[in-house]
Image (spheres, rainbow, N blue to C red):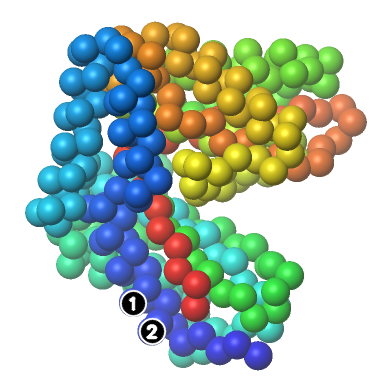
Amino acid sequence: MKIVNCNEITQAVKEMTMKINTILPKDVMDKLKEKYDEEDWQLAKDTLNTIIENDKLAEEKSIPMCQDTGMAIVMVKMGQDVKIEGGYIEDAINEGIRQGYNEGYLRKSVVEDPIRRVNTKDNTPGVIYYDIVRDPEHFEIEVAAKGFGSENMSRQKMLKPADGLDGVVDFIVETAALAGPNACPPIVLGVGIGGTFDRSAVLAKKALMRSMDSYNPDPFYKDLEIKLEEKINELGIGPQGFGGKTTCLRVLIETYPTHIAGLPVSVNIQCHAARHEHRVF
């Protein structure tokens, strides 16, 4: 049996929360540089360079790369032989978020009620998901800071099976087009296909946690990721909406079996500040 103390969880979440807001993951920075090299529209190239320099400066100065330091998304993967001691796991996670946002001087953006909008003043609670994995002693936590300029442009649709692949592609490309400059492109699209109404949305969120250099292991969906990225970049929205061929950095697709009468599709949009980090205990 693997034993994990709540103090370890709090410390890890705190450290990840502060790190992701100031240091862009290497895979995302590499993708931005790759797109910079490929871009031939000067204004788009200059905009990408500004984004890259901003992210470098954030790391050098240990300051947030964006004024929206996001809502904390936490994904827990644990085996059935993991025991949490010293408290309640969600309290430990939220304490880590609280400490990280306070000590890191990060903007607190969470309101305690969606209608009666009073700020919680510490960016808690986070949105927490749990997966029980096959390795009985595996325990892993991934933290993301999800800004809402991009989150607000996300969409979900219950397509009909008869809509097929063309319907799926049209909906995803339409979602990117409707987002336009509002999602702070270049964007990353997490796509969830299948399951139920709610499951497809979680799949889309999980897809955003993948590395920029990863592809769906199914060759069919790998090809679809590439095709969609090409189609979205053909929209010509460009970095920050200034035009060019760099609207989308990646499309990442996750799927799940679904009912014979359904074809749920969710698109979770992420801006170029794709901030996430994981820790294995």
Looking at the picture, how far across and down is residue 271, in whole percent?
Answer: 36, 33
Name the element at disc 1. Answer: helix
The image shows residue 6 at horizontal and vertical percentages of 44, 83
Badge 1 vs badge 2, beta-carbon distance below 8 Å: yes
The disc label shown at residue 53, or none: none
> Which residue bears the numbered disc 1?
11
Disc 2 crowd, CA 10 A, few/some/many (<14, 14-19, 20+): some
User: Which one is nearer the viewer's eye here, 256 or 93?
Assistant: 256
Q: Work out whether residue 251 can be spotted.
A: yes
- Please indicate whether residue 104 sits to the left or right of residue 239 in the image: left
In the image, residue 153 above or below residue 115: above
Seen at 52% across and 22% down, the residue is 229
Label 2 sits on what residue type?
Asn
Q: Give how far across and how far down residue 234 sits, in percent.
A: 47, 10
Identify the residue at image location x=67%, y=27%: 223
Which x, y percent locates residue 130?
Answer: 60, 63
Badge 2 is on which residue?
Answer: 7
Quarter of the picture holding the N terminus:
bottom right
Spatial CA span between label 1 and label 2: 6 Å
Residue furthest right as drawn: 260
* Picture layout, residue 9 above or below residue 154: below
